[in-house]
Amino acid sequence: MLSFLGHRLLQLIPTLFFVSVIIFGLQQLLPGDPALIMAGEERDPEVLAQIRKQYRLDQPIPIQYFYWIKGVMAGDLGESMRIKKPVSELVLEKLPVTLQLASMAIIIALTIGVGAGVISAVKKDTWLDYAANIFALWGISTPNFWLGILLIFLFSVQLGWLPASGYVSLGEDWRQSLATTIMPAFVLGNAIAAVLMRHTRGAMLQVLTSDYVRTARAKGLVERVVVIKHAMRNALTPIITLGALELGTLLSGAVLTEQIFTIPGFGKLIVDAVFNRDYAVVQGVVLVTATTYITLNLLADIAYVLANPRLRG
């Protein structure tokens, strides 16, 4: 286990290096001059020259990358050109919001999707199986923005149970925080639950026909024990993979959902940065997102080993 973990950690170093090179390189292809953006209406050549010198924009691209990655390794993601605030502070401000929303969404998705997938596989070709497949088709086909607007109309406008928009942090008021995030979390978790249901059903159908499952049933074990302890545990691999990838997607920011419910998370941050050509913020957020994806893949690999004893060395 330790050798496996060490090997995977060693693979992260070149991966993160190439990711950083790609992020910085693609950033240089964006149109516009950062110096002109920072100067605003001031077009004095001396001011522009000073800005380029201050931010090393007059240096060759490899030199710019060297200073940028040097700052990243020291925890400095640069400074926002628009609001003159460290990018790391902006990330730390928005990360808890997106982390809360993503965590709630993935919990909803796993609860509904895995549960429906297991029931659908165990009750194959029954009305429960058909109902679960209809739910999956509905979840995949329903646009997030339409479902969000529908939930706002029903639970906020008609019933008045939940606030239509806004965000309250957990530290300020946890009840109000849950009230402001439950609808966007359900919107995000709904589509993921549908995909998880299909993957879980397929994996469970394959496992339920395995020899060790038939042996467990032949021993007289209760069906619940056979399904949960023997079948479901061995069907977790695709669920772990998909869950880790979907969580990474959620942490990168759900742009439309955050816009509809006015949630100040990663999605809104990066959209504003792109529209304002705030290059330092774009680079910082994309780098954090990519690192999150890579880390979640590592955690998924560790979960494989813990879930399947045959993979342990």
Image: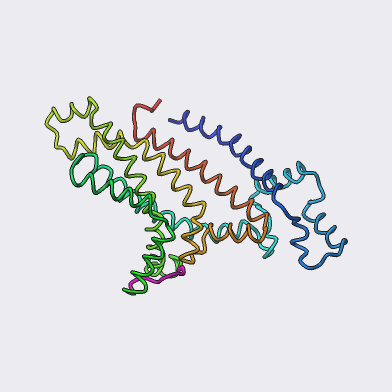
Q: Indicate left or right for 4 with 234 as reference.
A: right
Q: Residue at x 34, y 69 (%)?
A: 155
* Image-quadrant location for residue 176: bottom left
Q: Nearer the viewer, residue 182 or 150?
A: 150
Q: Which residues are magenta?
A: 161-168
Question: In the picture provided, is 149 more to the left or to the right than 270?
Answer: left
Q: Is residue 195 magenta?
A: no
Give the total of numbered labels.
0
Task: Check residue 162 for magenta coloring.
Answer: yes
**In the rendered image, the vertical position of residue 48 relative to residue 161, given as above or below:** above
Q: Nearer the viewer, residue 257 or 67?
A: 257
Quadrant placement of the C terminus: top left
Measuring from the top left, give residue 218's x and y in whole percent: 13, 27
Q: Position of residue 189 (x, y in %)?
A: 38, 53
**What x and y, as percent, mark residue 293?**
51, 44
> What residue sits 30% from the left and 45% below the top?
114
Query: In the image shown, does 271 or 133 lie closer to the viewer?
Result: 133
Magenta stretch prevailing secondary structure: loop
Q: How is the image coloured?
A: rainbow
Query: Which residue is rendered at x = 34% and y = 35% of the image?
Result: 307
Q: Quadrant of the N terminus?
A: top left
- Above or below, comparing residue 189 to residue 121 in the picture: below
Farthest left residue in view:
220
Residue 209 x, y percent position in the rendering: 23, 29
Going by the image, does 31 lie left or right of 164?
right
